[in-house]
Amino acid sequence: MVRFEIARNLETFEAIATAGERLHAELGYDRLAGYNWTDVHDTVAQMAKRGRVFVAWEGDQLVGYLGLAFTPLYFNRERFVAEEVFWWVDDSYRGQGIGEELMTMAETEAQERGAAWISSNLSGESQIKPWLEQRGYVDAEHVMLRGL
């Protein structure tokens, strides 16, 4: 049985940093920059303090996580957006509602904190886009990257 919780301890941050290395390679980010486990661990720990990190476990195995950051809007600093910074579900657990529960937790947290919007970043030809659109998300912006 999968259990969901808010990330609060070093063991969880370590598990996310370790799983993040697989995600980094899956998304092709390794061609942009190497993976620094310590930096990811420290970033997740800081995000857990300032934002929120949700995790899904089956027993002692991490099977999913979602990190949420809260950023003031540049045109109105009294309002802010909740941004999904990272979101991952283990391949063998996809299609079981784990990603949906993690996103629901994130949306609830964003509403409770008074966010004006919640955003989700998509990579390439993401299979999750139609699902997000069904939840009311709209295609609002694209990010283009160029190595320097």
Image (cartoon, helix red, strand yellow):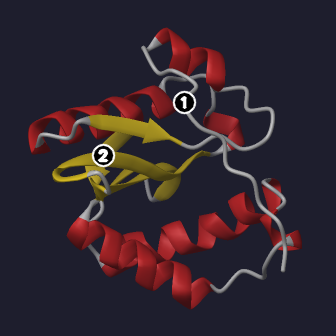
**Residue sitting at x 71%, y 40%:** 91
First along the sequence among labels 1 and 2: 2
Mark 2 belongs to which amino acid?
A: Val
Q: In the picture shown, does residue 120 fall above or below 36?
A: above
Q: Residues within 10 Å of mark 1 (few under 14, many from 20)?
A: few
Residue occupying the far bottom of the picture: 38
**Residue sitting at x 28%, y 75%:** 9
Is 116 on the left or on the right of 59, as rendered?
left
The image quarter in which residue 92 lies: top right
Q: In the picture shown, does residue 10 fall above or below 74?
A: below
Residues 14 and 105: in front is 105
Mark 1 belongs to which amino acid?
A: Ala
Residue occupying the far right of the picture: 31
Which residue position is annotated with label 1?
140
Q: Quadrant of the C terminus?
A: bottom right
Give the image location of residue 81, x and y in percent.
Answer: 30, 46
What secondary structure is found at the residue carrying circle 2? strand
Which residue position is annotated with label 2?
81
Q: CA distance from mark 1 to mark 2?
A: 13 Å
**Residue sitting at x 34%, y 77%:** 45
Residues 106 and 14: in front is 106
Residues 75 and 129: in front is 75
**Residue sitting at x 57%, y 17%:** 131
Asked whether the viewer can see residue 70, the reply is yes
